[in-house]
Image (tube, coloured by chain):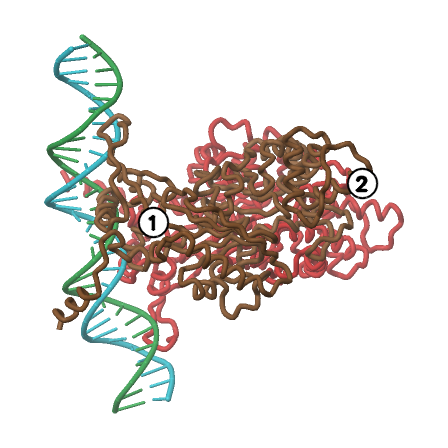
Chain colours: A brown, B red, C green, D cyan
Amino acid sequence: MDKLTAHKKEVIKELFFSGELSAADISTITKKSLPIAGKILAELINDKWIIENGYAVSTGGRRPQMFSLAPDNFYIAAISMDQHVTQAALIDVNKNIVSEVETLELNLKENDAALNMLIDFINTFIQKTHIPTNKIAGIGIAMPGFIDANKGINYSFFRNTKGSLSTHIAEKTGLPVFIDNDSSVMGLAELRMGAARNCKNAMVINVGWGIGLGMIINNKLFRGDNGFAGEFSHIPLFTNNKICDCGKTGCLETEASLYVMAERAMKAIEEGKTTMLKNLSLDQMQETANKILSAAVKGDKFAVELLSESAFNIGRGVSILIHIVNPGKIIITGRGTVAGKLWLAPLQQALNTYCIPRLAENTTVEISLLGVEAGLMGAAALVMENLNKDFIQKTGKGKPELHSVQKEMKNTAAV
Amino acid sequence: MDKLTAHKKEVIKELFFSGELSAADISTITKKSLPIAGKILAELINDKWIIENGYAVSTGGRRPQMFSLAPDNFYIAAISMDQHVTQAALIDVNKNIVSEVETLELNLKENDAALNMLIDFINTFIQKTHIPTNKIAGIGIAMPGFIDANKGINYSFFRNTKGSLSTHIAEKTGLPVFIDNDSSVMGLAELRMGAARNCKNAMVINVGWGIGLGMIINNKLFRGDNGFAGEFSHIPLFTNNKICDCGKTGCLETEASLYVMAERAMKAIEEGKTTMLKNLSLDQMQETANKILSAAVKGDKFAVELLSESAFNIGRGVSILIHIVNPGKIIITGRGTVAGKLWLAPLQQALNTYCIPRLAENTTVEISLLGVEAGLMGAAALVMENLNKDFIQKTGKGKPELHSVQKEMKNTAAV
DNA sequence: AATCTTTTGAAAAAAATTTAGAAAGTTCCC
DNA sequence: GGGAACTTTCTAAATTTTTTTCAAAAGATT
């Protein structure tokens, strides 16, 4: 990629995540000189990529001209998957969801038809939006599994694809496709547009059917040697003889996860425990989990205890993370976030119990503000991080297209 | 620092760690164009920093001129400390120890006189070497504790120093001083001149009185938000009710470390266990540890079992590291390394037991080749990483000094 | 001997930064 | 309330830095 395009890409990216910036802001963020920043901005205005946005209030001197992305110039197709449910949404340049959030019940395990169903779902979704494909920057897919994002391969699901999974979907949809692990991508979302902005090191804990981990290290998403970093759910933390999905025993997720909470709730109810919870079923995990979480929010003593137990166990895992990584922030995200701040006290209690005070002191725990949209926002962020150079160079998206007759004339003239 | 000096610094650093490089090598390593590399090299030759080293064998084309650091141009004072013993050695441009390795028995805990003893020790050591101080690039100090290397502060030891510890020692010795945590610095040594060269992510396990961790992340030493990353010894891994130095229970170091091995050995001997070990004492930890390690090397069944138990427990901790960081290599270093490959089998056994196979497969475990010198080498590497700009600009170190008479003449001429 | 590789140096081109000054505000002090 | 002094933004020109290009030199390969 030539340097000019690389610079443009970076500026577009920063404007997407920040919304509005001045030339001076761009200069400091990109660590380029002001003349360079000015030049890039002028070109991007000329290409109709960005617009001038009037003057900001003064901070003690001349007021800066502000810039932002031109509205309707492009969109992002964001796909967020978990083991059971897949969601799709269209994101615009202001990070808003501008379509219906489409949902597909799609079980990833032992389902040979899943890939084709996914592709159909995506294609139908894009058609429904009525956005021309040349205005879609790409498709971002957040999904579970061991994923090599560079190669676009998921070693856990859709393994029978020949070649890379992302290339395969790109061929079937006609759009650039970027794939990464769901928890990692949620980490990216927090880094770029959530609670981890301006954090050097942050650990994003994805509380769902398992306990995922997105790692922000040195202001960047960290993926390890093979893209497998953050396999938090399966750290051997307990000596409990409970067998885990992964074949081992004592994994964190055998003692903390929405799934474990559901199991425990059902057992307790069977034993006659007093609680507002009823009619739970492991077959309808999503509904069951939501029932437990909202019961906890409403103050149901048993549900709160259940949640606190999981939170404390997660905290034990987090205390290990803190010892090893010394992060500035821990951020709780994922499906469990519905219960909000209920997670904080028991988790902090575990940190107080298991962390060296000097380490615990320097780390704050927060609930993600992105909430249930974290996965979709992460998928969008993934596309912006990998923005295609061809897409950036595709100038004149704002200009009217030449008609075929005009093209003919141009060609003739050239001969 | 101006760019030229920054470039020079980087070239000097790479030459120190690599020994010999061609202009093309420098260009690729520093990611600068060949003309730049050539220009820097020419200037450095002119400054007597480096020498031309003849031609290397051809790799299919013209033979490259090789460059290396000029011998005797500068030296590094390396200090390696642990809780009980402090070592000092002089390192030359070829990474060789060119002095006696001086040793000082210095207990860091509850010892108000320790800092002054350390400073005296360093000053005496430097005097003994008979190297003029303007030829010493700096003093690198590797020591235990919570250290903020940027600020030069050790929050665990020597806390009564007013201002930063490194500045204080610098004032008392008249040389630049760089301080960092011992395990981190061993990680740096492995990254730059050991088994972690060319590793993107590597975990360096320092087996000593506790279990330290130096983290290499994205080809760089990683220190976390406050410089406390890698606090591996105190991750809460066991439910054993053994109280640890840090005040908590169940820390990794309560079940794996040379100290624990010594305790267990003494208890077993008391109980009449069959072993070649005898006359052990916790007061003379270094000797006791060495006795156990060398007994294991000689094949003493009990000593091997003792070591294997510790290795397996370390492995359990390492399996957590692997799940979280997905590193390409695990490197065993520190005092325990004396027992060499004996650590590998039981540690690998733990990885096989506690790791998801796909993760364990991608990580290899090795014994450091730097051995007992790892701390000193790390301290030297620390100095090279932070090489002072003034020191680099101090040209003419190779040129003969003007005599005072000549200086007089110059001064007169100038008037 | 002809063809390919790699290194090397010089010249040309491109890119980026520094400098300087003008424009547009704010703040503080009398 | 009105300057004076200070800030911040913005533009253009001058300068510096860096990369690209080209060609020659030196060796390997077939």
Q: CA distance from mark 1 to mark 2?
A: 57 Å
Identify the residue shown where x is 36% and y is 62%: B28
Identify the residue shown where x is 24% and y is 34%: A54
Residue B213, compared with residue B121, is above or below; it is below
Give the quarter of the figure containing the C terminus of chain A. Answer: bottom left
Residue B66: x and y in percent read: 36, 66
Which of these two is toward me, A254 or A219?
Answer: A254
Disc 2 secondary structure class: helix
- Mark 1, residue position: A10
Decide: few, some or many residues near mark 2? Use Cα within 10 Å; few <14, some 14-19, many ≥20. few
Disc 1 secondary structure class: helix
Decide: few, some or many residues near mark 1? Use Cα within 10 Å; few <14, some 14-19, many ≥20. some
Q: Quadrant of residue B104?
A: top right
Q: How many tags in the picture?
A: 2
Is residue B221 shown to the viewer in this render?
A: no
- Residue type at mark 2: give it: Glu
Q: Which mark sits nearer the N-terminus, 1 or 2?
A: 1
Pointer 1 chain: A
Residue A277: x and y in percent read: 72, 36
- Residue type at mark 1: give it: Glu
Residue A30, compared with residue A405, is above or below; it is above
- Mark 2, residue position: A270
Disc 1 vs disc 2: which is toward the camera? 2
